[in-house]
């Protein structure tokens, strides 16, 4: 037991001696081992950014699918892919033979019902006058009234039917609802389309390709930082050297879950004056959630520096005062000649590396970041100072 205690005392004493030697070496800065100096930086104007990255798809702002509400055969097509169209312009026609036949039949039925209605109306009016003079029985009057009302209802029904037939005939003439560009064409001349429970799409027209949008999927961990109006930069694989810009226009509240990953759609408006952006391109998006440009800032570690009087005096410098700072949110040490003086500052935005200074410092002032040691060249050239992977085996001893 005594031997173990004695060994422990020896080890403790050796550790104390090693620590003392290291401290003396650092404080005295022996020749050939390195020098201690202050690390400083100037107060400068920089841009401070924080960003969120996402992936999205380039889409037109307004995209209209043009279809037809009647079944039939496509007779004529007047536009093709990439054609520019105007609102109301004729873009396709369907075969109208069947629809025109239905219209003629409906007109004939309407004419017949109108003749029947007019006859029954005159008969009813005559019977009504005789009934008022008690020259006809109640049964004859009731029958005349019944036939008159039946003819009137049939006539009104045929009027409504012919309106629907005329409208269907109008649907056979397909026009563009907006000014834009034909993005896709889903039919050919002679093709039969069936309008049942779902309207078939014939064309897809984009309003204006000079005004595009990017719909990006932002992760749920980042969506809280995204807001409307934030600046956005994005690239597409088609033009890897070009950076496109835009702004957040809408943050949609509906969540999408895929493979247990929850994302939210963010709509980004983007100008496309050169028509480089095409619908469907994949965009790599950077949303700047913090975007402070040309602001006075210092490295963030300047706010964490606290000088050691002993080390500072060995550098031939002096410390004056203590930081006064009721309204300030921090303090930095400014190098003024051979003196370190504390200065209270108010801080603003920070990206982790740089912190904005709202008040307390002026551009060009030198702030202290910490102490650094310069390693001599002969030490750097020594084999022991060379960097190597910790996983590589060492040289044989």
Image (spheres, helix red, strand yellow):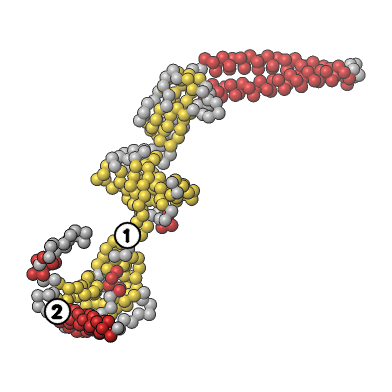
- Is residue 43 shown to the viewer in this render? yes
The answer to whether residue 291 is above or below residue 20 is above
Residue shown at 26% from the left, 83% from the top: 3
Residue shown at 45% from the left, 49% from the top: 260
Q: Residues within 10 Å of mark 1 (few under 14, many from 20)?
A: some
Q: Which residue is mark 2?
A: 29
The answer to whether residue 203 is above or below residue 53 is above
Measured as percent of width and height from the top left, residue 41 is found at: 22, 70
For this view, does 322 lie left or right of residue 77?
left
Residue shown at 12% from the left, 62% from the top: 396
Q: Separation of disc 2 and disc 1 at Cα?
A: 40 Å
Q: Residues within 10 Å of mark 2 (few under 14, many from 20)?
A: some
Q: Which residue is mark 1?
A: 49
Q: Regarding mark 1 in the picture, which secondary structure is present there?
A: strand
Q: Which mark is residue 347?
A: none
Measured as percent of width and height from the top left, residue 311 is found at: 21, 81
- Give the total number of marks visible in the rendering: 2
- Is residue 16 shown to the viewer in this render? no
């Amino acid at each position: 037991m005594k031997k173990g205690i004695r060994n422990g005392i020896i080890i403790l004493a050796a550790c104390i001696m090693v620590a003392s030697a290291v401290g003396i070496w650092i404080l005295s800065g022996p020749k050939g081992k390195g020098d201690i100096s202050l690390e400083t930086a100037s107060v400068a104007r920089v841009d401070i950014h924080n960003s969120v990255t996402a992936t999205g798809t380039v889409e037109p702002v307004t995209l209209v699918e043009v279809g037809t509400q009647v079944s039939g055969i496509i007779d004529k097509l007047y536009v093709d892919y990439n054609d520019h169209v105007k609102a109301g312009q004729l873009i396709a026609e369907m075969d109208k033979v069947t629809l025109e036949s239905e219209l003629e039949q409906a007109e004939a039925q309407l004419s017949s019902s109108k003749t029947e209605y007019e006859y029954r109306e005159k008969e009813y009016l005559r019977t009504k006058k005789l009934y008022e003079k008690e020259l006809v029985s109640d049964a004859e009057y009731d029958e005349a009234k019944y036939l008159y009302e039946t003819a009137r209802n049939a006539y009104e029904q045929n009027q409504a039917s012919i309106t629907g037939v005329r409208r269907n005939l109008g649907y056979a003439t397909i026009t563009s609802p907006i000014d834009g560009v034909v993005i896709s064409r889903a039919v050919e001349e002679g093709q039969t389309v069936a309008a049942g429970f779902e309207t078939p799409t014939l064309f897809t027209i984009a309003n204006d390709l000079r005004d595009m949008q990017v719909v990006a999927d932002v992760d749920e961990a980042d969506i809280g930082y995204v807001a409307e109006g934030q600046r956005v930069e994005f690239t597409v694989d088609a033009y890897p050297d070009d950076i496109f810009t835009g702004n957040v226009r809408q943050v949609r509240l509906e969540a999408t879950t895929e493979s247990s990953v929850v994302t939210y759609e963010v709509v980004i408006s983007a100008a496309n004056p050169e028509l480089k952006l095409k619908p469907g391109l994949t965009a790599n998006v950077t949303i700047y959630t913090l975007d402070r440009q040309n602001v006075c800032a210092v490295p963030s570690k300047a706010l964490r520096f606290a000088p050691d009087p002993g080390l500072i005096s060995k550098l031939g410098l002096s410390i004056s005062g203590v930081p006064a700072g009721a309204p300030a949110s921090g303090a930095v040490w400014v190098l003024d000649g051979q003196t370190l003086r504390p200065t209270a500052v108010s801080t603003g935005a920070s990206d982790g590396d740089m912190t904005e200074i709202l008040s307390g410092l002026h551009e060009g002032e030198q702030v202290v970041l910490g102490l650094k040691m310069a390693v001599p060249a002969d030490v750097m050239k020594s084999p022991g100072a060379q960097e190597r992977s910790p996983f590589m085996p060492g040289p044989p001893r």
